Amino acid sequence: MATEKHMTYENLLYGVSDGVATVTVNRPEKLNALNDRTIAELTDCLATLATATEARVVVLTGAGPKAFVAGADIAELSGLTAAGAHELARRGQALMDLIEHLGKPVIAAVNGFALGGGCELALACSFRWAADTARLGLPETGLGLIPGYGGTQRLARLVGRGQALEMILRGNMISAGDALAMGLVNRVLPAAELSAEVAKVAREIAGRSTLTLRCALQAVDGGLASDPSAGLRLEAGLFAVAASSEDGHEGCRAFLEKRPALFVDR
């Protein structure tokens, strides 16, 4: 039977069901733009989810049919001092780092425009599934700015320097199909099917051992942040943790006995 929990925020909708937490940026009249309050609420919500045992996987999406998150709130960017801009960038970067290193899979369901800070939000997630109507981009150079929430770093690591620089320097939007071709998103689905399909894969992943998921995330992320030899040493150590755990033993026994595994997250 599904269990549900709810927290209340001004600019977010939140709920947990069957091990999957769904966090929806809820400012459809502003195309879900990331203003300061929304960043603060997302930070609070995700920090809570990091230790919430009932939430094994997180889905991030946007309210309404038009936007995932259509960038930062331009009204808050206008007239910033250097000190204010630096502080704003660091707050946004802290949120993206929290998402990237949450210790749980975070799936971006990109249901519409994912521009600027919205694209950066999606980039911080474990992977991205997009609606065929979605449009993605980092348009900051057209405003006399550059991406400030990690976009210059994560995009280049994900799709390569040339592809990232073309997107950033031109500042143009790309289609979901083009994003798929360059590896920016993992899968493109009809808009009407996106929510259900993301929920389905999130429940599938939520059925895994949380210890195993955490080890896999640490191995990939830690390896990307180090040289290949160090990455392999990290992988071996985390493989040892998983293989010697109760869940590692249970998973192998279940496979040999041809039955579903009963994981206990230890």
Image: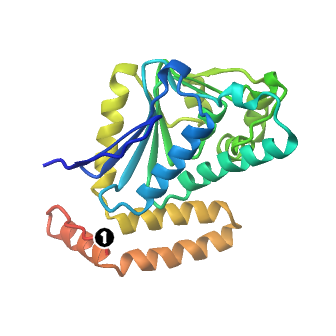
Q: Please state if 181 lies on the left or on the right of 104 as rendered.
A: right
Residue at 62% over, 33% down: 182
Q: Give the image location of residue 120, x and y in percent.
A: 63, 39
Does 242 sit above or below residue 153? Answer: below
Q: Please state if 3 lies on the left or on the right of 162 as rendered.
A: left
* Residue 49 in view, yes or no: yes
Report how many numbered discs are placed on residues in the image: 1
Q: Give the image location of residue 207, x and y in percent.
A: 27, 56
Residue at 50% over, 61% down: 217
The residue to which callout 1 is attached is: 265
Q: Kindly state the secondary structure of the residue where label 1 is placed.
A: loop
Q: Give the image location of residue 198, x and y in percent.
A: 36, 37
Residue toward you, 125 or 149:
149
Residue toward you, 62 or 226:
62
Residue at 35% over, 64% down: 210
Tell me the quarter of the picture where residue 155 sits. top right
Q: Give the image location of residue 34, x and y in percent.
A: 59, 34
Does 15 sit above or below residue 235? Answer: above
Tell me the quarter of the picture where residue 252 sits. bottom left
The kind of residue tagged 1 is Asp
Q: How is the image coloured?
A: rainbow
Residue toward you, 153 or 184:
153
Residue toward you, 75 or 62:
75
Q: Residues within 10 Å of mark 1 (few under 14, many from 20)?
A: some
Tell me the quarter of the picture where residue 245 sits. bottom left
* Residue 122 in view, yes or no: no
The C terminus - image quarter: bottom left
